[in-house]
Image (spheres, helix red, strand yellow):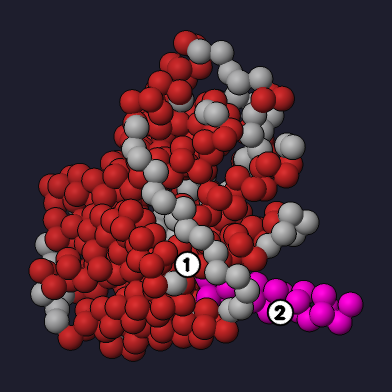
Amino acid sequence: MTDERAGADTSSASLHYLLLATVLLSVGSGLLTVLIPIGGEQAGFSVPIIGGLGTLYYVGFIAGCLLLPALISRVGHIRSFAAVAAMAASGTLVFVLAVTPLTWLVLRALVGFCFAGLFMVVESWLNDQVGSETRGRVFGLYMVAGWFGIVGGNLLFSVDSPTAFSLFALASIAISVSLVPIALTTGAIPTVPAPAGVHFVKLYRTAPVGLVGCLAAGLANGAFWTFAPVFAQAQSGSSLGVSLFMAFAVLGGALSQWPIGTLSDHLDRRWVIAGVSLVSAAAASLFLLYREPLNAVLIGVGAVWGSAALTVYPLCTAHVNDRANPTNFVKVSSRLLMAFGIGAAVGPLLAGVLIAKAGIAALFLFTAVIHTVLAVFALIRVRILEPVAEEERATFAPLPPIGHGTQPIFELQENIQAERDP
């Protein structure tokens, strides 16, 4: 009995360490999400260069998802985490030491590559630590830890000037300190799934709305994360305004996933995807029509935009898994992650071209068009193909923002789904 209690205590401690690492990594990621585009603007970078910073982050992240499982399998979780954490923390400081477009573009890709490995280690270890009786609760805690950390990182942006060394140092410290709880984690060393091959044609035939929706969500969200801080800075002229705008957009997405997801479990998900896409487009249109300085109204509209736009990707993932073979959950979801990543890499470049011609508010014209096209496509497919029967649908599970979730998180979801529907 004593040995069993000691084992349970050790497992509980390891779980707390992993969740603490999640919060710290998310704080660093959330701070850099705001800091990099505004820091680039303050340094005089052109709009296409700022768009490139967003693009290369996602290119690096997807490359990390593809290449780092082999490294982790070869040298182990703690050594891999230590290596990529050191690279990410050091790269974050180099942003201040070498303020040139080329250096920042390379560093942004490097940081994206490293964050893929960091979250991969945490997620795969977390998945291995939990049993069937606690898996759902732990997944919920992981989601809360991630969203909470991102909001905290967004709010930290307001503590100093966008060009101050202290902000980059805070992001670097958060990444570095995340190594401490990982080093204290005990238990069996988990496995990391090999990246799945990409078969987009077959996936499109299975669920066109799901695949197109993931790509569209990547286009819109990649552009938003890259240029929304610049928009908020232009509208408010203050770091606090930027922090609040970004934090409330993230909070909107975090709080809406469960109610919208639950609704989608009882309706044809394509109707829900079309609905949230239209809400996103309407909220984006308000930014074009309401040209006042940043205030509570605009921050509220940002929260509405986030509550709708940040649910598109998990809704599309759930829709595809309704129609796909349940035994292929991880492979299918990893391909959807790839589709989102491709969209997120292309979105900042396309939005950057539009913004360079029409001004920063054109960001929301871009996202409004993307979401409107997705809504129309989803409604067309509703007329063409019958919905999945309710008893055959998978249960919706929320997902973290891309750049915060990797393939192992889909393994955790798969295990939860299998336990709910034996």
Residue 251: percent from the left, percent from the top? 54, 59
Between the C-alphas of marks 1 and 2, the distance is 19 Å
Question: Which numbered circle lies on residue 95?
Answer: none
**Vertical arrangement, residue 214 with respect to residue 4, above or below:** above
Q: Residue at x 22, y 79 (%)?
A: 95
- Could you tell me residue 29's position as x and y percent? 40, 69
Location of residue 306 in the rendering, given as x and y in whole percent from the top left corner: 48, 51
Total numbered labels:
2
Front one among 10 and 275: 10
Secondary structure category for the residue under label 1: helix
Front one among 43 and 388: 388
Residue hosting label 1: 121
Q: Is residue 353 left or right of residue 154?
A: left
The boundaries of the magenta stretch are: 1-23
Coordinates of residue 241 in the picture (x, y in percent): 41, 70
Residue at 68% across / 41% down in the picture?
A: 418
For this view, does 243 lie left or right of residue 345? right
* Residue at the disc numbered 2: 10
> 200 or 185, which is in the foreground?
185
Q: Residue at x 36, y 61 (%)?
A: 70
Residue 101 is covered by the magenta coloring: no
| Disc 1 crowd, CA 10 A, few/some/many (<14, 14-19, 20+) | many
Q: Quadrant of the N terminus?
A: bottom right
Tell me the residue at 47%/10% (across/down): 384
Residue 47 visible to the viewer: no
